[in-house]
Amino acid sequence: MDIYTLATLPISFLVTLIIGKFLIPELKKLHAGQSIREDGPTWHAAKEGTPTMGGIMFILGTGVTVLCTGWHWMLRGNFIHLYVYLFALVFGMIGFVDDYRKVARHQNEGLTAKQKFVMQLAAAIVFLCLMRYEGLLTDDLYLPFFNVSFHVNWIAYLIFAAFVIVGAVNAVNLTDGVDGLAGSVTLVVMVFFTVTGALWTGKGGMNLPLFPAALVGGLAAFLVYNHHPAKVFMGDTGSLFLGGAVAALAFAMDMPLVLIPVGIIYILETLSDIIQVAYFKATHGKRFFKMAPLHHHLELSGWSEAKIVAVFSIVTAVCCLLAYLGVQGRY
């Protein structure tokens, strides 16, 4: 891991911390308060009005940092860290539009599901084609732990990859429902991508770990404001950006199946929602979980928000360690 990557984390932390100091009061002045779901846990009503769109702080903090610390790489014609950031930024912008509509209408509904799906799918396809054009993405599907790759027809791979990206982005978004949860879990995932990216850098001279390292610092600073009780929420602005970052890094490192172990919490949250809806329809009104997604079920089972964040982060850390061991043969 080079000096630029090591410096990226503290720089991003400080920049994001400072941005947050000014951003939160401005969000309050704009009355950019979060509307709480009526069908959510009753005690979440106390969070009504907490400023949302706080994801802007780590989006800006990360962006400023990767531009500064990655400048010397860009002068050499290496832009992969910027491609990944810009891809995540597109998703953050979709989330911003969604958040803005919610704030403007003072309700918990923004863009329609169809609108978000079409925009996300288009962004995913453009990113994948760009990475393919730049020679940064192959159509070989790598299997972690087995250290083997299978060649896949490019069109089939593109379709598969686009839907994986959209699914991953929305899974991260679904995880954002408890103070500090999405930020903490994703911080751990970004540590994995930083360390794994550093291995790749040693082999290929690439600068990819700059982005996840910057996001680690940015999320650490954001959690200063977002830990329970949260002073600000990241909103869809932040959660869709994080989802884009997680998905883009997996594909930029050409190992999308690593999303299964490192994103285990995102997967469990999504599955709990799918199971709840399917069971509700099949039984004509009965519920499998007390409430979906999973973090709400655990809340209603007596778990505190702090306990949920701690356990989910530990589970993610263990799975990321296993994933790290599973991709060693690739490098």
Image (cartoon, rainbow, N blue to C red):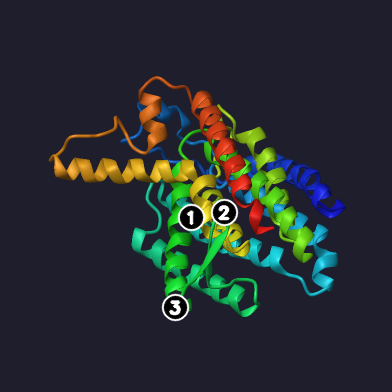
* Residue 102 on image: x %, y %: 43, 50
**Of 29 and 198, which appears nearest the observer?**
198
Which amino acid, by three-letter code, is at mark 2?
Val
Rate crowding at label 2 as few (under 14), some (14 to 19) or many (20 or more) other CA atoms within 10 Å: many
* Residue 324 on image: x %, y %: 63, 46
Residue drawn at point x = 79 percent, y = 58 percent:
202
* Residue 281 on image: x %, y %: 17, 45
Residue drawn at point x = 47 percent, y = 54 percent:
168
From where the camera sits, is residue 206 visible? no
Q: Which residue is mark 1?
A: 169
Q: Which residue is mark 3?
A: 155
* Residue 301 on image: x %, y %: 36, 22
**Mark 2 vs mark 1: which is more N-terminal?**
1
Query: Answer yes or no: do the residues labelled 2 and 1 have beta carbons within 8 Å?
Result: yes
Count of marks placed on residues: 3
Which amino acid, by three-letter code, is at mark 1?
Val
Residue drawn at point x = 40 percent, y = 58 percent:
111
Residue drawn at point x = 53 percent, y = 73 percent:
139
Identify the mark at residue 246; answer none if there is no mark.
2
**Mark 1 vs mark 3: which is more N-terminal?**
3
Camera-near label (1 vs 3) is 3
Which amino acid, by three-letter code, is at mark 3?
Ile
Q: Residue furthest top?
A: 302
Label 1 sits on a secondary structure element that is helix
Q: Is residue 256 left or right of residue 303?
A: right
Rendering quarter of residue 23: top right
